């Protein structure tokens, strides 16, 4: 197995700009040890057999409800990742529409969302036969809310905003989208899968950020991944609802088979109890002060990367990020060819198509890698300017 992994990208030295999220080795070990202490248990049995896991799951969800300023009567679910959390929110919104309008109006239902919204909405729409309507972005890469307004009709089941969006690392104007949601009576889901568990601590540290949580009356659900910037073991995400009745809409219930009622708040039946235990342990290990310290280090690291990248001739930052996601490119040379140079130097380059750019989603693995990254980025740009690497064949992909 070690031989199989010997050709992997050297992510431990920060050479993969996504997939792995690390705070520090101690936090990693706390989560890992808790995970394997509950390796065998099944979180599906958290209310019938594994009461300790059930308690841990409730306490993790209570932490999230508190973090996102949820009102009385709110509820949460522990899921396997952002795609599942988003799928459940879309299902709940669709079923809320059906409860209000009846199934006879199902044909041609749609979701209105920013062009930068995550591809998990595409996946959900494909499964549920929904139309996606994408609103354009302002030059700062945040959604044009007035453009969203024009896309709404009587078959719109869901509005979407990101905190932040994956391509550009910026928080959409959730306050304005929430006002639109209240005005139109349409469900608003905030996709905080990337930033949900860390952005509140950026704000507590004094970073000026937009509100995106349940303090805004129009926000009806929020997804937030623990296994990203919550620094918890995979697979672990959360989904929160303003009203427990909406969680009921996301439920999957089957009772026609011989074994009686099967009821889950998630797509998955069996779920790894280790993920619940790992999340509980990491949240208690870090606490508010630990997350504030991580947020401060991430902010300082991001600012340093921005300064270094902008100091390279011809390089531009496409959006001023709200957290540690950076999207950058150039008007004067082929950024794909630069990406090829970075690949040749042992980095995993990820790209955006609109606009053409390199993309970094960085955790604290990338703090000690900054000088090496910037040096290789400078060298790759120099090669391109000398006519090296030619036309790149690297494409923008996710996952």
Image (cartoon, rainbow, N blue to C red):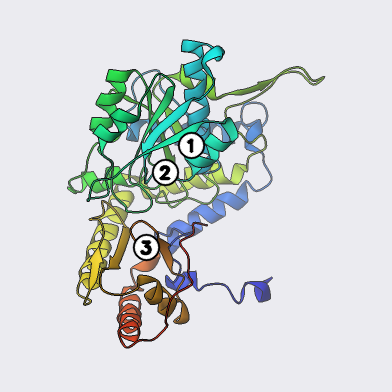
Percent x, y of residue 65: 38, 30
Percent x, y of residue 229: 39, 51
> From mark 1 to mark 2, how far is it between C-alphas?
9 Å
Check if mark 1's residue and mark 2's residue have beta carbons within 8 Å.
Answer: yes
Seen in the picture, residue 354 relative to 48 is either above or below; the reply is below
- Front residue of 53/149: it is 149
Whether residue 166 sits left or right of residue 83 in the image: it is: left
Whether residue 225 sits left or right of residue 179 in the image: it is: right
> Which mark identifies residue 193?
2
Q: Secondary structure at mark 3?
A: strand
Categorize mark 2 by other alpha carbons within 10 Å: few (<14), some (14-19), many (20+): many
Can you say which quadrant of the picture contains the N terminus? bottom right
Q: Dot 3 corresponds to which residue?
A: 360
Q: Earlier in the sequence, mark 3 or mark 2?
A: 2
Q: Nearer the viewer, mark 3 or mark 2?
A: 3
Percent x, y of residue 390: 42, 81
- Front residue of 130/374: it is 130
Categorize mark 1 by other alpha carbons within 10 Å: few (<14), some (14-19), many (20+): many
Q: Secondary structure at mark 2?
A: loop
- Front residue of 203/193: it is 193
Whether residue 132 sits left or right of residue 304 in the image: it is: right
The picture quadrant where one finds residue 64 is top left
Count the numbered circles shown: 3
Seen in the picture, residue 121 relative to 233 is either above or below; the reply is above
> From mark 1 to mark 3, how far is it between C-alphas?
23 Å
Q: Dot 1 corresponds to which residue?
A: 86
Camera sees residue 242? yes
């Amino acid at each position: 197995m070690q031989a199989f992994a010997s050709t992997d990208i050297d992510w431990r030295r920060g050479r993969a700009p996504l997939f792995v999220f690390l705070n520090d080795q101690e936090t990693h070990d706390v989560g890992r040890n808790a995970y394997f202490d509950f390796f065998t248990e099944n979180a599906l049995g958290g209310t019938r057999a594994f009461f300790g896991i059930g308690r841990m799951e409730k306490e993790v969800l209570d932490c999230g409800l508190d973090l996102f300023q949820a009102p009385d009567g709110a509820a949460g679910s522990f899921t396997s990742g952002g795609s599942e959390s988003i799928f459940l929110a879309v299902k709940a919104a669709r079923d809320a529409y059906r409860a209000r309008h009846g199934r006879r109006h199902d044909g041609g239902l749609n979701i209105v969302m920013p062009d930068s919204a995550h591809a998990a909405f595409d996946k959900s729409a494909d499964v549920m036969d929904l139309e996606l309507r994408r609103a354009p972005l302002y030059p700062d890469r945040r959604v044009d809310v007035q453009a969203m307004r024009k896309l709404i009709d009587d078959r719109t089941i869901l509005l979407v905003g990101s905190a932040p969006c994956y391509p550009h690392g910026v928080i959409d104007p959730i306050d304005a989208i929430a006002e639109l949601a209240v005005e139109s009576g349409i469900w608003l889901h905030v996709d905080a899968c990337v930033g949900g568990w860390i952005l509140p601590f950026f704000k507590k540290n004094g970073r000026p950020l937009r509100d995106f949580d349940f303090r805004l009356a129009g926000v009806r659900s929020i997804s937030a991944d623990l296994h990203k910037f919550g620094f918890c073991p995979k697979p672990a995400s959360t989904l929160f609802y303003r009203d427990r009745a909406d969680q009921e809409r996301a439920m999957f219930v089957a009772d026609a088979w011989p074994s009686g009622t099967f009821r889950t708040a998630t797509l998955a039946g069996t779920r790894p109890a280790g993920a619940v235990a790992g999340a509980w342990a990491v949240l208690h290990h870090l606490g508010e002060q630990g997350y504030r310290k991580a947020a401060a280090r991430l902010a300082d690291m991001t600012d340093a990367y921005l300064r270094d990248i902008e100091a390279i001739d011809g390089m531009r930052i496409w959006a001023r990020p709200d957290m540690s996601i950076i999207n950058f490119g150039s008007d004067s040379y082929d950024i794909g060819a630069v990406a090829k140079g970075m690949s040749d130097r042992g980095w995993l380059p990820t790209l955006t198509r609109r606009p053409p750019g390199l993309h970094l989603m960085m955790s604290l693995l990338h703090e000690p890698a900054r000088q090496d990254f910037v040096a290789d980025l400078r060298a790759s740009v120099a090669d391109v300017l000398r006519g090296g690497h030619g036309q790149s064949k690297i494409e923008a992909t996710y996952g």
